[in-house]
Amino acid sequence: MQQTAASLQSETAKAAEVAHQLGKNKADNIALSHQLQELTARYDALRGKDAVALERDMEATRQAVAQLTLDRQAQKVALTREKDAAEVELAAVRAQVDETAQLLKALQAEVVETQEITLLQEAGIYEFRHRLADAVAYKTALQRLKDSIKISAKNNHAITASTDWTVNGSAVEGQRMVRDFSKLMLRAYNAEADNCVRSMRPYRLDSAKDRLTKTRDVISRLGKTMSINIAAGYHRLRLEELELTADHLAKAEEEKERIRAERERQRDEQQAQREFEREKVRLAKEQAHWRTAMRKWAESGDESKTAAAQSKLDELDEAIRGVEEREANIRTGWVYVISNVGSFGEGVVKVGLTRRLDPLERVRELGDASVPFRFDVHAKIFDADAVSLETRLHQRLADCRVNRVNLRREFFYATPGRILEILEEMGLRDNLVDYVQEPEAQEWRSSRRLAQAAGQQPLPAD
């Protein structure tokens, strides 16, 4: 294809050179016309001289005009010949250009686009070709299909070929030759199919199927004299193998994401459970101290301190009951609204859930290593059914989702003010423990100032 393109460029250059020569000849013709006009003007100027001198000058002028006329006619004839030759050559060049363009188009039709960036940009939401329950089901279906492919190849159902060939007058030798060529063609086809399976990514499925189909077409063209073709049924099996492989990879990734989210939820739950246990131990220890102090004050007869100690013990009992209720009710917790201007830009918030006693612990974990800056907390909402509250908030913000494919990513194009409006519409304004409209973003703002002071490009805010 590169040689064809080079030939096309060479012929185009020749055509440009011919056109340039035609323009040069035209310019020469114009110059001769100017000379003829000058001589005519000179002839008119000499008409006032005496008869002998005038006749002599007129004769010289006539000879010069005649010579110029002959030169012009000769040049015109030569120019006409060159023009005819150039038109013939230009027509030949155009014919070759058209032939080269058709060849280039035919070659491009055999090329399969495999650029990673192009495929990724064109990739949309993956659509499963075969709907199965889980990755294990896809793996089982793939194994059954591979067995069918092996059986088809073993029973000689993978490729078709002519059987009436003879070599040196021997039909047996002819059949052996056709059989050997058929095996070679089938091996080439299977090598391409196996390579497509090994390098499969869900977004490459259409490209892989196109490549395998064109490989089959090439084999059919090369084996045309012996009618060698990859059987349609075998080709369908290999295409189905590509589809099942892509489905299996997509489902496995989907399950990994679900398992990751579940593990994250379990870690948060386990951390919350540890916090409940530590809080109960702390409250029990504090309760024991107050009981000891109350006994001493009661023995000494200090009724005011004894009453204060009893009041404190009642508060501790209430706190212990609250922790035990939180521990027993797995739906009770905090819904938090956070942002990270330096990482995601302005107008993006995360709405999440935690059962921790202190939701800021969960926020600090989110900002530890996965993002360059810490998160800013805009709102903390405590609710007895925080799971339902989070779900309702996500539903109200469904049109503002950042990631519309993976719904476990809880980021939304929204502002803290919008979350506050939704809470007021839901009648949950009183559940709002803390609310901050503007993000502090201290690390990001300080980084911008340092970059500007050093004369460097400031960090983007969006």
Image (cartoon, rainbow, N blue to C red):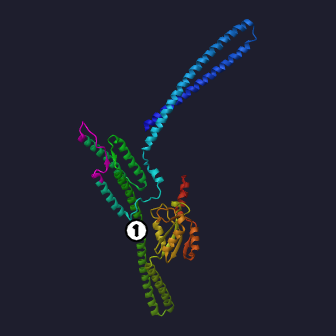
Up the image or down, 368 lies above or below 152; here it is: below
Left or right placement of residue 261 versus residue 396 in this view: left
Tally the numbered discs. Answer: 1
| Residue of label 1 | 263
Residue at (46, 36) in percent of width and height:
100
Identify which residue, 86 or 197, lies in the foreground: 86
Q: In x, y percent, where is residue 372?
A: 48, 60
Identify which residue, 277 or 102, lies in the foreground: 102
Amino acid on which the number 1 mark rests in the picture? Arg
Left or right placement of residue 141 versus residue 67 in this view: left
Q: Which quarter of the rendering shows the C terminus? A: bottom right
Up the image or down, 271 lies above or below 450; here it is: below
Magenta run includes residue 171: yes
Residue 263, located in which quarter of the rendered image?
A: bottom left
Q: In x, y percent, where is residue 334?
A: 49, 73
Up the image or down, 93 lies above or below 165; here it is: above
Up the image or down, 148 lies above or below 399; here it is: above
Residue, far top: 52
Q: Which quarter of the rendering shows the N terminus? A: top left
Identify which residue, 318 or 424, lies in the foreground: 424
Left or right placement of residue 86 versus residue 211 in this view: right
Residue, far front: 164
* Residue bounds of the magenta highlight: 152-173
Q: In x, y percent, where is residue 86?
A: 53, 26
Q: Secondary structure at mark 1?
A: helix
Q: Predominant secondary structure in magenta?
A: loop
Q: Does residue 204 appear in the picture of this structure?
A: no
Residue at (52, 27) in percent of width and height:
88
Q: Does residue 196 appear in the picture of this structure?
A: yes
Q: In x, y percent, where is residue 386?
A: 49, 74
Identify which residue, 401 or 70, lies in the foreground: 70
Residue at (42, 44) in percent of width and height:
111
